[in-house]
Amino acid sequence: MSTKIYPIGIQNFEKIRNDGYFYIDKTALMYQMVKTGSYYFLSRPRRFGKSLLISTLEAYFQGKKELFTGLAVERLEKDWIKYPILHLDLNIEKYDTPESLDNILEKSLTAWEKLYGAEPSERSFSLRFAGIIERACKQAGQRVVILVDEYDKPMLQAIGNEELQKQFRNTLKPFYGALKTMDGYIKFAFLTGVTKFGKVSVFSDLNNLDDISMRKDYIEICGVSDQELHENLDIELHEFAETQGLSYDKLCTKLKEYYDGYHFTHNSIGIYNPFSLLNAFKYKEFGSYWFETGTPTYLVKLLKKHHYDLEQMAHEETDVQVLNSIDSKSTNPIPVIYQSGYLTIKGYDEEFGIYRLGFPNREVEEGFIRFLLPFYANVNKVESPFEIQKFVHEVRSGDYDSFFRRLQSFFADTTYEVIRDQELHYENVLFIVFKLVGFYTKVEYHTNNGRIDLVLQTDKFIYIMEFKLNGTAEEALQQINDKHYALPFEADGRKLFKIGINFSEKTRNIEKWVVES
């Protein structure tokens, strides 16, 4: 019986080591980073272990050798020098006013000035920060270590509010710029965040940062690799499999399908989301753990604002410039969605330098699509899961009339604003519904020039559907027959329904469906 205590939600390295929590040793990579450079930036999705990495670096630079007993760095490090550390955590505050950022910077600077003194002439945040760095170095006789956790939280929370974002940018740009000015007094600086804001943004003064987010050497610095999973949790995998009534191999396959699949550069190994993985081991059951800790609504606002075609999301293509940095004025929602962890790298065209993106795993794909439903369809968050359950039940029992009536209710009360791009709106709602139904049945979904054809398969039934916009349901059914869509299923023993559906611009809804069986 495993006695491991899983450090869920615990981001303090000292607490993990002193209180006997399970820890996967990342210290060899940390040591490599410290010994081969001075200024680093790492972008990873939320709950991926960034704060724990910062806490580990803090303990290392404090010279707390006793915490590293039995870990790789114990063999590697000989000196264990104590350095002055300035640790700024921007995770705490909710950034909805310019003052919210000022308050947190003021709080940190005041605390550091108590330790290292202050100068009356240093009035701005950046001058105060620079003065503290210099005095800390002189007083300690060692250069300073600077650790910034979630550097981008203010910018991210202000997405969609150009004025507020501009104010945050104007505050943070010179503040982080002090790192470059005070280079001679700095031993090491490490900044983490979910995203990388580029162009005329907070990093433009800080061009000496080594961004390791997409570097092969550091893919495993946060998260869990397949090798780490089997090396550290093999007994637990057997116990988990037994609890689930699955074979060892089946359980490993299911874990991979649910929580693995993050690729932070091309041709690299997959990484498991550590938060979901550890929760699954703790409770020995599969759940949407990462998702339940909150999905930012700004992602949906971005998708809707830019009239994004959701079907594209599962096979989006882009290049490294787009992936690597977010321009706050950009009209492309994809970099934010990729860097937030809802999409990952699925393939790479070396000749043209093009990345193909997709959902990393089942947890993220199902969770994200479920999350989208109330924002696109006329259904509230509470009813949403029950509606999907009813859809699936209707499809499985051959009750297509109830299915389409329920679908009609999803389009009711569509706002005028949406109607400007009506075709896309109705495609997006259908995509969400059939994607969610598809987690329980087999769905093939195709769209082109104002129509959608769709095949839905259950144990007993096959549905072939054709959706038209401003045509007639009869024309849609005719097309199924003319194009012989049913041909591949003629020898199949299941009952076949051919359904033509028309969507009317006038009623802004499904106007009619006709069925041939």
Image (cartoon, rainbow, N blue to C red):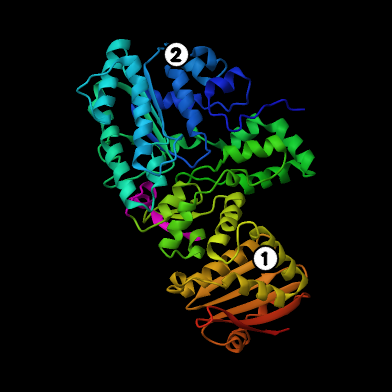
> Circle 1 is placed at which residue position?
442
* Mark 1: few/some/many CA within 10 Å (<14, 14-19, 20+): some
Q: Which residues are magenta?
A: 315-329
> Circle 2 is placed at which residue position?
63
Specify whether 145 is left or right of 497.
left
Q: Is 162 placed above or below 284 here?
A: below
- First-in-chain label (1 vs 2): 2
Q: Is 353 placed above or below 498 here?
A: above
Residue 313 visible in the snapshot: yes
Q: Residue 444 sits in which quadrant? A: bottom right
Q: Nearer the viewer, mark 1 or mark 2?
A: 2
Specify whether 481 is left or right of 460.
left
Query: What residue do we see at 74% from left, 66% from top?
Result: 393
* Mark 2: few/some/many CA within 10 Å (<14, 14-19, 20+): some
Q: Amino acid type of disc 1?
A: Lys
Query: What residue do we see at 33% from left, 25% from top?
Result: 109
Q: Position of residue 350 (x, y in %)?
A: 40, 52
Observer-nearest of 68 and 384: 384
